[in-house]
Image (cartoon, helix red, strand yellow):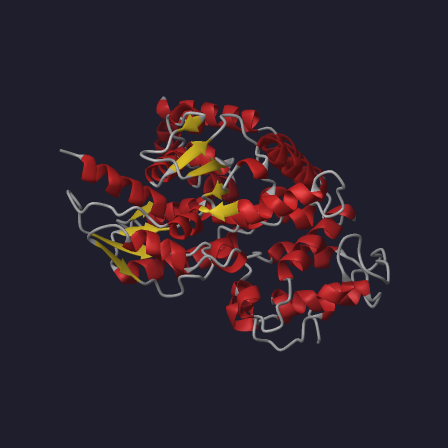
Amino acid sequence: MVSDAQPAPGSAPAPAKGWKDLDYATVQQCMHCGLCLPTCPTYTATKLERNSPRGRISLVRAIMDGQMPLNREFAEEMYFCLGCLACTSACPAGVNYAEIFEQARAEAERSQLLRSPKRRFIRWLTVKWLFMDLRRLLLAGRCLRLYQRLGLQKLVRISGVLRLFPKRLRELEAMTPDIPRKFSADLIQPVTPALGKRQYRVAVLTGCAQDLIFSEINRDTVEVLARNGCEVFTPPRQSCCGSLHGHNGEWELAKELARRQLDQFPPDQFDAIISNAGGCGSHLKHYHQLLKDDPVYHERARLWDARLKDIHEWLVEIGIQPVPSRNACEQVVTYHESCHLCHGQKVVSQPRKVLLAIPKLKLVELAESNWCCGSAGIYNIVQPEMANVLQDRKMKNIEATRATVVANGNSGCLLQLINGARARKLQVRVAHPVTLLAEAYRRAEES
C-alpha cells in the first residue's frame, strides 16, 4: 500500500510496537481489498489514497511498525476523516475501523501534534469545560436564547455588521441553532408513568446538544414510550455521554463521563436505557470496551451495553402500539440515515418501521440515504469545505424526492439538514421519526 503522506522533518518517532490502547492485530486485519473506497465520502471527493480508510489504516500500521514517524500530517489526516463508519459496513473482514480511528486521534492528542494556542483554547472551552458540566452548556444556551428572543440576532444580521467579520465567522454565525423556549427538564417529569398497564421500566438519556437544541424530541420520546407501556425515568440533571470526547481523542474524559452515566443509571434497574441520537448511541453501546481495564465499572458497563437501545430499535422490539387513523394527515416523508445509527449501531430497518406505523404517511426512499450529510459531530465546524460538499450532495437528493418532510434520528444531522434547507430555501420540514409518531398519537386523540 502506497500512501500520499510523507514524514515531516523533525517528527518524533513512535514506538515500534502497538500504541497505548490499540491492539496491533486490529490493524493487521485490514486486507487492503479496497471495497471501502467507494463508500468513503472523503476518498470519493479527493481520490487520494491517504483520504481513504485503507490509506489511513496503512498510515497507522506504518507508524506502529516504526517505518514512518508520528507527524502533524498524520494527525491532520485523522481529523479529515468523518468517522462516518460507512467503511465498516462495506468491509468483508470486519475491521474495527472505529477503534483504529479513535485511537489514532487519541495518539495525535497525546503527542500534541496539532498544538497551537487557538486550538488549545477552543478544546478547553468546549470539550474540557462546557461539555463536562451541562449546567454550563445550558447557561450558554439561555444566553443565546435571550439574544435571539430579544431580536438582537435578527438586528445583527440585517445591519450588515457581520460583513466586518472574517468569512469563517460569518459562516459559523449562519449555523447558529434556534434555542427552544424550554429545555428537557422543563418539559419532562423525572418519572413519567406508563399509559395503561406498565410493562417496562426504562430510562431516557436527554443528551447535551439534543437537550440544548431539540428538547422537544426528548419530550416526544418520553411520551411515545409511555404510550407503549413504559414507565420512564428521566432525571433533570444528566451528563454528556462522552461521544464528543471519545471521537476527539480525549479518552480519559470519555471514561469519566461513562462512569457518571453508570452511576446515575444503574443498568440492572431498567429493562432498557434509551438513546434517541444516533451518534451518541453508537458511543454509548461500547462502554464496556471503553472501561475494560476498570475493575469497578467494567462488569456494570457490560450490562449497560446490553441494555442500551436506540429508540427505534426498542419500539420495534416491544411492538409499536397501533396509531388510530382518526384525524391522520397525509404526508410524504423521506428518511436520511444517521451514519452512526446505520453503520455504527446497525439500526437500519427499525426507523422505517416506525415511520410506516403512522397512518397516511408515504415513505419515499432517499437516494444515498446512508451517505454522510457532513455533520459528523463537529466536522462541519472544523472541516467546513468538505462538510459543505456533502451537505450539498445530500440536499440535492432530498429535493429530488419531492418529500415535504425529511426524517432523521440524530441531532447533528438534523441541524445540518435544517441549515442546508434554509440556505437553499428548500420548503421541507426536518423532524425526528419519534416526533412524527408522537404527533400522530396526539392527532388521534383530538376531538
Image position of 169 (left or right of 292):
left
Instruction: Provide residue 281's location: percent of width, then percent of height.
Output: 52, 47
Residue 151: give x, y in percent of width and height: 35, 25
Residue 312, relative to residue 224: is it above or below? below
Give the position of the C terminus as an image quadrant.
Answer: top left
Q: Quadrant of residue 393?
A: bottom left
Of residues 151 and 325, the one nearer the viewer is 325
Considering the image in quadrants, where does the N terminus appear? bottom right
What residue appears at the point 71 percent right and 69 percent down from the top-left corner? 58
Name the residue: 81% across, 61% down: 69
Return the residue nearer the eye: 271 or 179: 271
**At 29% from the left edge and 58% from the top edge, which residue is drawn?**
399
Relative to 293, 339 lies left or right: left
Place of residue 116 in the rendered image (x, y in percent of width and height, measured from the top left): 72, 42
Q: 273 or 161: which is nearer to us?
A: 273
Q: Is residue 31 visible?
A: yes
**In this view, which residue lies farthest toward the left?**
447
| Nearest the eye: 408 or 227 | 227
Q: Position of residue 188 (x, y in %)?
A: 40, 27
Do we see residue 250 in this rendering? no
